[in-house]
Image: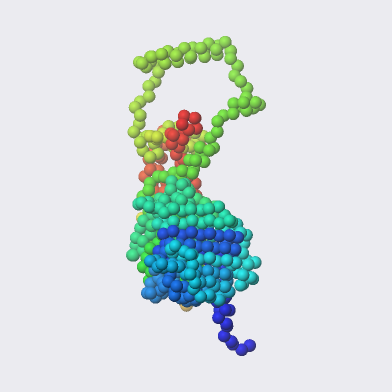
Amino acid sequence: MPIRRLSEDMVNRIAAGEVVERPASVVKELVENAIDAGATRIEVVTAGGGGALIRVSDDGGGMAPDQLALAVERHCTSKLDNGLDDIRSLGFRGEALAAIGAAARLSVASRARGADDAFEVTVEGGRVSAAKPAALSAGTRIEVRDLFFATPARLKFLKSERAESAAITDVVKRQAMAHPDIRFSVTGSDRSGIDYPVATGADAQLTRLTQIMGADFRANAVPISAEREGVMLTGFAGLPTYTRANSLAQFIFVNGRPVRDKLLLGALRGAYADLMKRDRYPVAALFIALDPSQVDVNVHPAKADVRFRDSGLVRGLIVGAIRQAFAAGGLRSSSTAATAAIAAFRPLDRAAAYRAPSWTPPRVSSGNAALATGFAEESQAVFDGADQPSADIPQAGPEPLDVARPLGAARAQIHENYIVAQTTDGLVIVDQHAAHERLVYERLKHGLDDNGIPSQILLIPEVVDLAPEDVDRIVDRAAELAELGLVVERFGPGAIAVRETPSMLGAVDAGALVRDLAAEIAEWDRVVGLRDRLDRIAATMACYGSVRSGRRLKAEEMDALLREMEATPNASECNHGRPTYIELKLTDIERLFGRR
C-alpha cells in the first residue's frame, strides 16, 4: 500500500489515546496545569464518573484571550523555557488540552490576573471556536463533557462510575499530598464531597498527609530527612508493624510530581526487607528533590515514570535513610497493635460463666465461712487505720528505677512466653521469642558486616555459561561479589568460573545464583539479591538460636532481655515483621475498667 500522510484530525485522535486514557487522566492534566498557574484553590466537579462532566476551576494566573486559541493547539506550552533538560513544571509537553479537545466537548474560560474581562473558547471534535466573553471572576475554568464521544470505541474500556470516581479521587489525593499550600476540593453528583484545606505551620506536610491518610498515620510514622550528592529525601515512613495488604498506601514524589516508578517502589520494599512480613506492604510518603537535569520525566506522555541519571544513588538514599530513621527513632510500638489489643479485651459475662457446664460454684463449708469471716475482719482492721505494717507481712522494697526505662521493669512471665513489664505510665507485654530472635539476628548481621562473609572453596570450580554482556556485568562486579563470599572470574568470552561461594548458603546451585545475579545487575545495576539471600539465612539461624517459647525465665533474665531490646535497632519487630511487644497506656487500662 502507498504511504500517505494522516489527517490532522486522525493525528490528534491518536495522540489523545496516549494522553487521555480515562477520566482520571483528564483530571490529572488539568490539575497539574492549575498548579503550574500558581493556584491556591483548585475545585474539581464530576458527574457520571467523569465521563459526563469534569469541571476544574482554579484561582491561578489565568490567560489572555489571544492565548486561549494557542492553549488548545497541539505542542503549544508556556513551560519549556529551559529545554527538556531543565523541566521545573508539572506539565511541559503541550498536548493535554488538544488531546482532550479531540476526544470530548471542551470549553476553556479564563481571566488573566489584573484583566477586566474573561474570555472563553470551545473545542468539539477538534474544531476550535473563536474567543468570546465569559462570566468568571478570576483564574481558569475548564469543562470537559461527553468524554470519548468522538472516539466511542474507548467507552467500552471504561470501568463503572464508582471505579472511575475513585480513580479521580486518587489523582487529586496525590496532588494534594505534594502541595499542602493549596486547597483541593472534589464534589459532584456521583460522589460524596472531599475537601483538603490548606495546611500551614512547621508540620504542614504531615498535617496534609494526616488529612488524607488518617490520624493513625501521624501516630505510626517516623520522619525521613536525608541528603546525598545533591539529592534530598524527605517525608514519612510507617513503622514496620504498621502495614497494608497491598501497595496502594505507598506514595512517592519526584520534584513535586507523583510517580509510580518500579525502581523507587523496589527501593522502598528493600528498606523494609528484614523488618516486615513478606506478604505485607509498607505505608509511606516520600518526597525526592534533585536538580531537574539529573532526572528524565519525559519517558511517557502520562509522566508517571522517571529515569534517574544515577539510579543507584537514589535507591541507596531511600534504603539508607529509612533504616537510619528507624534505628535513630528507638523503640516504637505501633498504636494500631495496642488498639487491637484493647479491642480484644471484653468484660466477663458472668451469666455465661455460671451457665458453662465446666464451671460449678464453690461449696461454702463452715470452715470456709469461718476463714472468710476471719479474712474480712483482718482486712477491716488494716483499713481501719493500722498505719504501722504488721511485722509478719513481707514488705515491698522501693519502686525500682527501671520503670522509667522505655520498656519498664519486668514483673511477671505468663504462659512461659510473654513478659509483662511495668512502665511509668502503663504496661508492656513482650513476646520473648520474637524479641530475642531480633536480637540474635542483629548480632549476626553485625558479625557479617564487621568480619566479612566467610566463603567455601569449591573442589572443582563450576563453569556457568552466560551471554557475553552478562559476563561483563558479573566481572565488573567481581570485587563487590567477593565481599559477599562469591568469588568468580572470567572463563572465556561467554562463561564465568565460580571458585568460592558463601559458606552460609551451604550446598548452592552456583549456576542459578550467578544467572539470577546477572539478571538483577542488568535491571537494577546493583547486587542486592545475594545479600538479601544471606540476610534471610541469618534470619532463619536467628529464629532457631533464640529463646524458645515455653522456656521459663528468671527475673534478671527478663530484665536483661528488656535492656538489650532498648539498645538494639529495630527491636520493635522480629525478623518476620511481627511486633515484639505491645504497650498499653494506663489511661487505656483505666478506660477498660470504666475509670475514664
Q: Is residue 352 above or below residue 454?
A: above
On the picture, is 292 further left or further right than 539? left
Question: How does the figure colour the protein chain or chains?
Answer: rainbow
Residue at image coords 43%, 46%: 219
The picture places residue 246, in percent across and down from the top left corner, at: 54, 55
Q: Which residue is nearer to you in this view: 328 or 596?
A: 596
Q: In the rendered image, which quarter is residue 306 located in?
A: bottom left
Residue at image coords 40%, 62%: 288
Where is the N terminus found, in terms of image quarters? Answer: bottom right
The picture places residue 568, in percent across and down from the top left corner, at: 38, 46
The picture places residue 58, in percent across and down from the top left corner, at: 45, 62
The picture places residue 54, in percent across and down from the top left corner, at: 54, 63
Q: Report whether residue 270 is seen.
A: no
On the picture, is 409 further left or further right than 167? left
Residue at image coords 59%, 64%: 51
Q: Which residue is nearer to you in this view: 164 or 512?
A: 164
The single residue placed furthest to the bottom in the displayed view is 2
